[in-house]
Amino acid sequence: MTTSVFFPVGVSNQSTSGTLAALNDAVTLATDSLGSVGVNLSGTNAGATVVIEGLIAGTTWDTIKVYPLVAGAAGVMSITAAGDFEFNCAAFKQVRARLSVAGSGSFSATLNGTGAAKHMAVKNGNPADMQVQPVPASIPPTDRSGSIAAGGTAQVLMAANANRRAWWIQNNSSGDLWLNEIGGTAVLSQPSIQIQAGALYETPASYCSPSAISIIGATTGQTFTAREA
């Protein structure tokens, strides 16, 4: 059975329902003026698969990723059990719930559309689906300040630390300091990082190496202030 219902533009909520029992049974909703659609599947249809599809033009239906109404749930491209789901539909003129694999039993399907968007879509279906990630609580930094023990000889500024989130160093001396933050030994020239007298270096927001950090200065006793978090 295939059911199609069309509604006039401007109606705030639009709804249609039907039964999905035989292969390719579908419940279709016109979505002009709508922003999002909620889908309810009820009943038991063992072994069945339902896909949600959208039509932009012509006769080609595109599969839509839908989101179970469960906190933290990732989007899915097909549905195999009863439940509530939602998706944005602004790009489509029609959407439908279609039985792509028949099972033993049937689903009752209801599609309810509204003018409001329900969630932020993810470009190209990023696997993370823009789910919220917990932000670790701030921690007090560890003081790594010191001085150059022997001019011209590299020394360890910070040991390797897989949990390192940020670090910074200020050159308090009148001469340059040089750093290697990727596990190598610092030298008094490139490719080490140069920190001029009085300058401050801190890790970029997008990058913090967990490797050991090596430091070198030309003169014994050159001082620096450093912190690691």
Image (spheres, rainbow, N blue to C red):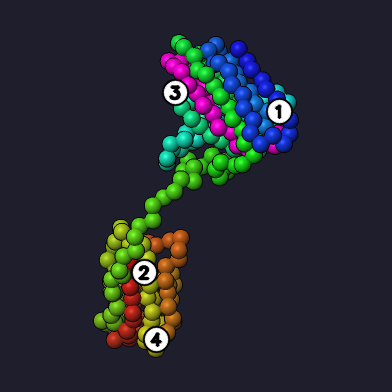
**Residue 160 or 3: which is nearer the viewer?**
3
SS category of the residue bearing label 1:
loop
Sequence order check, earlier mark of 3 and 2: 3
Give whichever of 176, 141 is nearer the camera: 141
Q: Which residue is mark 2?
A: 167
- What SS does tag 2 mark? strand
User: What whole-number distance in Å separates the C-alpha atoms at marks 3 and 2?
Assistant: 49 Å
Give x and y (percent) for residue 223: 32, 84
Distance, label 1 to label 3, CA atoms, is 28 Å
Return the residue at label 1.
7
Q: What is the magenta range?
A: 32-51
First in sequence, mark 4 or 3: give its number.
Answer: 3
Point out which mark residue 175 bears.
4
Amino acid beneath label 3: Ala
Residue denoted by label 3: 81
User: Which is nearer the N-term, disc 4 or disc 1?
Assistant: 1
Query: Is residue 33 in the magenta section?
Result: yes
Q: Dividing the picture into quarters, in which one does residue 219 lie?
A: bottom left
Answer with left or right where residue 58 lies relative to residue 220.
right
Q: Label 4 crowding class (10 Å Cα cut-off): few <14, some 14-19, many 20+?
A: some
Q: Earlier in the sequence, mark 1 or mark 3?
A: 1
Residue at (44, 81) in percent of width and height: 199
**What quarter of the picture does the C terminus occupy?**
bottom left
- Please state which amino acid type lies under the numbered disc 2: Trp
* Residue 55 visible (yes or no): no
Queried whether the magenta region covers residue 180, the answer comes back as: no
Q: Nearer the viewer, mark 2 or mark 1?
A: 1
